[in-house]
Image: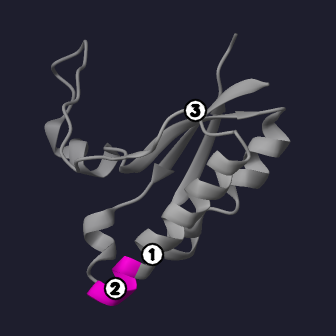
Amino acid sequence: MSRFLILIHDDPAGRQEFLSPEEMQTAIQLFREWISRIAVKDKLMNLPGIWDLESCLIRQNPEFPKELDSEMRPSIGGMFLMKAGNYQEAAAIAKECPALQYGAVIEVRMAIE
């Protein structure tokens, strides 16, 4: 089994603009159920976190234009580690993420062992 990092690129604050509180709770419940299914299969290596929208960008070149920060800053709505036999299996699990229906993009990266 290989380890895979699952990054959920999302903007939870923006999502609240078009979801009612009830719809937001439904979305959260769907996400929890998806994580539970991964855990039951003994694939989940750590629980996902919900991340602050603020970030600190560290650069070697301080001359980098600051006005590009907001456009270039990746929005990570969540991330966790899981086990899978290969990229295809990891991608198949990621494709079931309910956040996709709300505009999220799921990135799958395999750890180099």
Q: Nearer the viewer, residue 11 or 70?
A: 11
Quarter of the figure that contains the N terminus: top right
Q: Position of residue 97 (x, y in %)?
A: 61, 62
Pointer 1: residues within 10 angstroms few (<14), some, or many (20+)? some
Please tell me the numbered disc located at residue 19: 2
Mark 2 → mark 3, Cα distance in angstroms: 30 Å
Left or right position of 96 against 80: right
Magenta-colored span:
18-25
Name which residue type carries label 3. Answer: Met
Position of 59 with respect to 105 (left or right) is: left
Q: Quadrant of the C terminus?
A: top right
* Colour style of the rendered protein structure: one colour
Q: Are marks 1 and 2 in contact (CB under 8 Å)?
A: yes
Q: Residue at the location (32% across, 64% down)?
A: 12
Secondary structure beneath dot 2 equals loop
Q: Residue at x 34, y 61 (%)?
A: 11
Q: Earlier in the sequence, mark 1 or mark 2?
A: 2
Q: Which residue is mark 3?
A: 45
Earlier along the polypeptide chain: callout 3 or callout 1?
1
